[in-house]
Image (cartoon, rainbow, N blue to C red):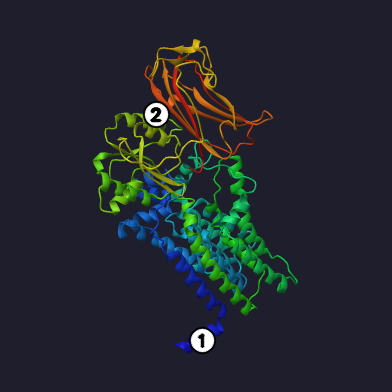
Amino acid sequence: MMEKLKVWIGQHPYDAIFVLIILVGAVLRLYDFSHWSLSNDELSALNRLRFDSFSDLIQNGVRPDYHPAFTQVFLYYWTTIFGLQTFWVRLPFVLIGIASIGLVYAIGKQWFNAATGLYASLFIAVLPFTILYSQLARPYSFGLFFTLLTAYFWGKYFLFHRHGSGIIIGFSLSAALAMYTHYFSFMMAGFFVLASFLFLSRENWKGFLISLLIIFLLYLPHLNIFFDQLSLGGVGGAEGWLGKPKGGWIFDFFYYAFGSSAFHPLLLLAFLTVFLVWYTKDIHITKIQWVLLAMFLLPYLLGFLYSIIINPILQYSSLLFAFPFLLLFFFSFFKADRLLVSSIIVLLGLTGGSWVAVDKADDYRNSQFADFQACAAVYMDWENKFQRDSITLTTAINHPYYLEYYFYNARKNPPKITVLESKRGRELADLVQIIEQCRTPYFAYLRLKPAPIDIPDVIAGAFPVLLDYKDYHGQAEAYLFAKDTSLKGLPQPKPISRFYCDFEEENEVFGVNAASLDTICYDGKYAMHLPSEIEWGPGIKITTRQAELRSPSKVKIKVNVLADSTLVDSPIVLTLTDQFGKQYVWLGGKLENFLTPGKWCTAYFTANLPHPNSLNDELKIFIWNHDHRNLWIDNFSIEFYKLDN
């Protein structure tokens, strides 16, 4: 047996090295893949599996999403058999991700030589970028696999002139599945169809037309879903969360894709050195090499232009399907004639790449995904300590199932979860009502998506003791507040400066004169009356030096307000203006999010401020009576904190 193995290694040295690559790639993907939290999108997918029929799944689980049907349909049947445990949910995606390493090697070896496939598959195997997206139970792993499978059969048909029915069916089925999986893998399949016209001949055009017909027929059932999802718009724009890419986006992508570390660029530099030493003679770019380069550039350019002109769609994950072709293009200039050099560089790449992959794994996960698992676990701990009936749980989350999932997995009934829906700040009004109706001594708040940073301060107004706080890398937070002030809470940071007006007398700093004082007040003897004809209310106008703002900071504003009628747009305004009169910060917190006409209410406004341009910049904070209502103002508090607190 050992003799046969030695003979095989001697005859196929590059294949033997590749076996080591795919083993390392498999270990890096299988290690710990089920122990970290499911992401928001994964939990969304599981939530959209809870239907009793396939038609309901398509209507309510696929159509409202921004992705084609394959992944959702696959999960529907897979989880029916294997269940909803994280291990079983993610396992097929991990295995397909491992198979993609093999396809990259096979394509590189067949189209060029074994060294091309070896080097390209090395990077696919060890980069944190490709590892992460092969572990997620989302369309990325299957989309990459089907894209590579499309390329594999396309090469067999057009480059190696294998025109059998099996190749035609393989190409057609792979392309259709890519189209069913992700719209960027759909795009990749389309580009391979377009590239086919560069290689058409009298021998292959009939089979190509047959493959187009098969692809069309296979995709036909999905066409109405495609148009429905197209009408949804995108994840960017005014109603979305994704911003337009900037001019240097592609360089940020390369930094991210190549491990966000110095190792992989240095490894590429080592390969470049090998190229310059041995492979610069008679260099020319062939048609297929141009195709490979286009397979990366076209998705990027189309995604970038669409994001700028129509609606932002371009994310790092979007280029996962195109990324292997950039690697194949780069390494297509190498030859399989330096086995010792290849072995050394690959071993170096596997060693250093594995270290980077393990070291960066948490960073890549934590920088993008909220930790639902940890938030559920910490809430379970609070329940054990304080009893479920004593805690009101409010969350900033897209759906309560995303937390309920972890209670079900722990064989516990989930608590009542009150969700603060995203309403462009109006969720603060919902929160005020929740707090007013709350009868429990403890109040828990879990932030698992972007939400107004005022929320903890609003809660603290009624539950002033912060018993526990967890920050999960900025992507999620868990707060537990208590009403009983005799309880010992976490130490709170002290403000670096504070400005306060109780309106009991004239106050020059806040612009309060005796004529504006009124006996209608929140407490004490007086408050400031702001008549409807007066637009600019009380506030401060100071320098950043007076506010002690020497670094990025946080401002917390709290004020009692009474309005005689409903407000529409009357904010607390904060501005920063430099010494040359250029305003570089304008922020507003809407009073109407907190006010009920005819009733004294407490309004909050919390904001993060950048590093001031200088200590002599002008800082203004004031109430803008834009709606021209009768307002009464009392207890105006402004506090500044260091942002790292």
Quarter holding residue 398: top left
Residue 26 visible in the displayed image:
yes
Quarter holding residue 264: bottom right
Q: Which residue is mark 1?
A: 6
Q: Name the element at disc 1.
A: helix
Q: Which residue is mark 2?
A: 429
Residue 124, position in %: x, y?
54, 64
Relative to 147, residue 309 above or below: above
Image quadrant in which the N terminus is located: bottom left
User: In terms of depth relative to the viewer, which is nearer, 208 or 379?
Assistant: 379
- Near mark 2 (Cα within 10 A), the count class, few <14, some 14-19 or many ≥20, is some
| Residue at the right extreme, as displayed | 282
Q: Which mark is residue 311?
A: none
| Residue 599 appears left or right of 362 | left
| Among numbered discs 2 and 1, the one appearing first in the sequence | 1
| Residue 516 appears left or right of 430 | right
